[in-house]
Amino acid sequence: MFVDTHMHEMTYSKDSFLSLDEMVRIAKQKGLGAICITDHDSMGLKDYAAEYTERTGFPVFVGIEFFSLQGDIVALGIDEYPEKRVTAQEFIDFVKGQGGVCFAAHPFRNNNRGLEEHLRFVKGLDGLEVLNGSTSPGACAKAAAYAEELKLFTLGSSDCHVPEKVGVCATYFPEEAKTMEEFLKVFKKGEMKPAYYRNGAYHILDGQRPEEICRISF
Ligand SMILES: [Zn+2]
């Protein structure tokens, strides 16, 4: 199953132009099996998404992209999040305390919102986003090199804010998940792989060297 694990919907991400309906429509077109809405410092869409999933049968998992004091971290499977900015480590511990999972978003994007060298010092990240559809291939390759060195699971996601970006990158999970509970179980096994969409299909990154990632365009 391919899942776009980091996406922004317009109701609670003010920099997004995407409605949930449109996101799901494009996701289905591309062959995604589920999507994750991870708005900036908000999980406001949770109830609406749950109702939407129940009505349509398409899994929409709501997490958050939390701007910690050291950079953005995406978390899934939590009910609560800190009301103000806290350190990356405090946020990770908070997520873990609730049984959730978290990964570093675009750690080397050039907007000062990635964890960058802090990746080396935080403990408990479940993964690292090595393909981010809104980040340069060079910064993605650098993330892949760090993931290799730090032995972290790797993910891909679009980080979409506009229709043409929905699903440009995604994460492949070898098992299906319809509920958040199932998704967390599959996630924690760590068998996921990053993927990108090109010519009408997803292509899984499997053992590619970071320098090869520089040549992927999405
Ligand atoms: Zn984002």
Image (spheres, grey):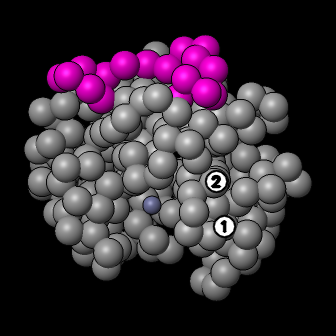
Is residue 100 visible in the rendered image? The answer is no
- Residue 9 can be seen in this image: yes
Q: Nearer the viewer, residue 12 or 52?
A: 12
Name the residue rendered at 78%, 51% in the picture: 119
- Asked which quadrant contains residue 216, the reply is top left
Q: Give the number of the disc on residue 71.
A: 1
Residue 218 against residue 96 in the figure, above or below: above
- Classed neighbour count for the residue bearing mark 2: other residues with Cα under 10 Å, few (<14), some (14–19), many (≥20): many
Horizontal and vertical percent for residue 193?
Answer: 52, 24
Residue at the spot 81% in from the left edge and 35% down from the top edge = 150
Q: Earlier in the sequence, mark 1 or mark 2?
A: 1
**Above or below, comparing residue 16 to residue 149 in the picture:** below
Residue at the extreme bottom: 84
Question: What residue type is disc 2 on?
Answer: Pro
Q: Is residue 104 left or right of residue 41?
A: right
Asked if the residues shown at circle 1 and circle 2 are in contact, with their CB atoms under 8 angstroms apart, the answer is yes
Q: Position of residue 34 (x, y in %)?
A: 31, 37
Task: Assess disc 1: are there few (<14), some (14-19) or many (≥20) residues with their C-alpha within 10 Å of its C-alpha.
Answer: many
Q: Position of residue 190 (x, y in %)?
A: 63, 26
- Counting from the top left corner in percent of width and height, residue 212 is at 55, 23
Q: Quadrant of residue 30?
A: top left
Dot 2 corresponds to which residue? 107
Range shown magenta = 197-213
- At horizontal 31% and vertical 22% (from top left) the residue drawn is 202
Q: Tell me the residue at 25%/47% (across/down).
A: 166
Asked if the magenta segment contains residue 203, the reply would be yes
Q: Tell me how far mark 1 sits from mark 2, CA to CA.
A: 8 Å
Residue 193 lies within the magenta run: no
* Amino acid of disc 1: Gly
Q: Ligand 1, what quadrant?
A: bottom left
* Residue at disc 2, secondary structure: loop
